[in-house]
Amino acid sequence: MATENRELEHSPLSGIVTRDGISVDVQIYRFAGPDEPWQLEVIDHEGGSTVWDYRFASDKHAYRAFNEAVAREGIGSFVSAQGKLLH
């Protein structure tokens, strides 16, 4: 089956996160299926997107990676990322 025809499953951990007055949309998703890895993407208020190159074994691992990045770099690091790719 072609990947463009596959359904996406969104994690319940996805959603708007606001810290220090900055809001971002955390998107954690995968192709539907229990064995598929999770993708993490953070979208800022201007539509700039930061995507992790790494795929995660669980949605909880993906959300933890987001929180670790915020703790390390601050939530402002996601603003106007415009296609930044994280490893």
Image: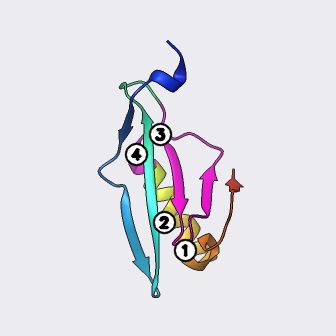
Label number found at residue 59: 4
Report the side of 56 relative to 10 (left or right).
right
The residue singled out by tag 3 in the image is 38
Q: Residue 74 at what x, y percent from top left?
A: 58, 78
Gap in Å between the C-alphas at discs 1 and 3? 21 Å
* Contact flag, marks 1 and 2 (Cβ < 8 Å): yes
Report the side of 68 relative to 73 (left or right).
left
Residue range corresponding to the magenta coloring: 37-61
Q: Residues within 10 Å of mark 2 (few under 14, many from 20)?
A: some
- Label 1 SS: helix
Q: Residue drawn 47% across and 50% down? A: 62
Q: Amino acid at mark 2?
A: Asn
52 drawn magenta: yes
The residue singled out by tag 2 in the image is 67
Quarter of the view holding residue 9: top left
* Contact flag, marks 1 and 3 (Cβ < 8 Å): no
The residue singled out by tag 1 in the image is 71
Q: Residue 25 at what x, y percent from top left?
A: 44, 64
